[in-house]
Image (tube, helix red, strand yellow):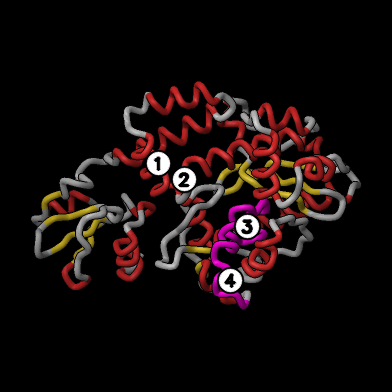
Amino acid sequence: MDDNEMWQAVQTCDPAYDGEFFYAVQKTRIFYRPSCKSKYPRRNNVEYFKSSAEAEAAGYRPCKRCRPDLPQYDPDRDLAKASKAVFDQYFTDRQELNQQLKELGVTRKQMSLVFKRYYDMKPAEYLIQVRIAAAKQALQAGSSVFDAAANSGYTNYSSFYAHFRKLSGMPPAKYRQLFAQNISRAVMDTPIGLLRIVASQDAILCVEPANYLEKKAGQAIEQVPADRIIPNDPSGDLVKACMRELKEYFAGQRQRFDLPFHLKAPASSKRSGSSSSRFLTGRPRSYQQLAEMTGDKNASRAIGLANNCNPILILIPCHRVIGADGSLTGYAAGLAAKKLLLDLEKGGTKK
């Protein structure tokens, strides 16, 4: 990690670098975590340390706001994680969900502000994503559309239909029909966690975090189900090919994927979504840069929607889209996974 990378982390208050290094301001004789929101320092007045002990030994005192001298100190992060855990566990029960949020001991407004800062979305947006993800799992397993809506926490079918179509690019009945075809699936262990791979006879349908819903429901995480990969079947062959290419990718031996995939996205984001899938190497791009690539500089919101709806992680490299200031933005597998993928692609070390 060089000075430029550390300075970028300080500029963007990037929490992903907390614990990786500490920075101190020579004028104030105070040292900080990279994520600290304290007054912006001058670059030529900054000194870096590998540990808080090194900073203290050099005569710096810890910031009282971010407490870099304490191994685990981030009350806002704890609140964000606690509220996310409530959404993950109680998304099907509105009454219990509201009760658990009250027990966090903060106002709904404060919780919403902290949640958005850490997860780059409003709590209501995250709740919709959790519920639609649950509905997709149910539809893939053969549940009726009505049961999928009810069992994922919806009491209003119109809202369910609108949210499902917005996030998947198709009506729930069509999504169910798509997965009712002859498909194969498997779960693969990777450096960013377990990934579920689903394929039809013609294309890869999704690559997604496999433990996303199982952890919320307290269920056992599905292991690689060899019996679900149908022998001598095109869908089974595609799943195996995808697993092979992902393995090569994580080993640093592949920069391009040679697999057909089926992608449905909202009409407003199809063009922007295809733009984000054109690049697999080189520097990551911001939403605005991708919008300019489409010929519409005002399409950055559509770019964001396309990446948010991406059901095929890594193959469609939405992890390569970053904020305009260079900061990492939300990712389905988490910001730590996003950082690992970007480090891997630029030849960095794996963690």
Give the residues drawn in magenta, as a range: 295-318
Please name the residue shown 58% across and 68% down the image: 299
Looking at the rendered image, the disc whose residue lies closer to the viewer, 1 or 3, is 1
Q: Which residue is mark 3?
A: 314
The one nearer the camera, 126 or 340, is 126
Q: Position of residue 96 (x, y in %)?
A: 50, 21
Local secondary structure at mark 1: helix
Q: Position of residue 91 (x, y in %)?
A: 56, 30
Mark 1 / mark 2, whichever is N-terminal: 1
Q: Marks 2 and 4: CB-CB under 8 Å?
A: no
**Is 227 included in the stretch rendered in magenta?**
no
- Helix or strand or loop: what does disc 3 sit on? loop
Q: Earlier in the sequence, mark 1 or mark 4?
A: 1
User: Is label 1 in contact with label 4 (beta carbons under 8 Å)?
Assistant: no
Q: Is residue 182 above or below residue 5?
A: above
CA gap between label 1 and label 3 equals 29 Å
Amino acid type at circle 4 is Thr
- Which residue is denoted by mark 4 in the rendering? 281
Q: From the image, state whether disc 1 or disc 4 is nearer to you.
A: 1
Where is residue 332 drawn, in percent x and y?
Answer: 56, 48
Q: Which residue is mark 1?
A: 112
Which sits in the foreground, 128 or 119? 128
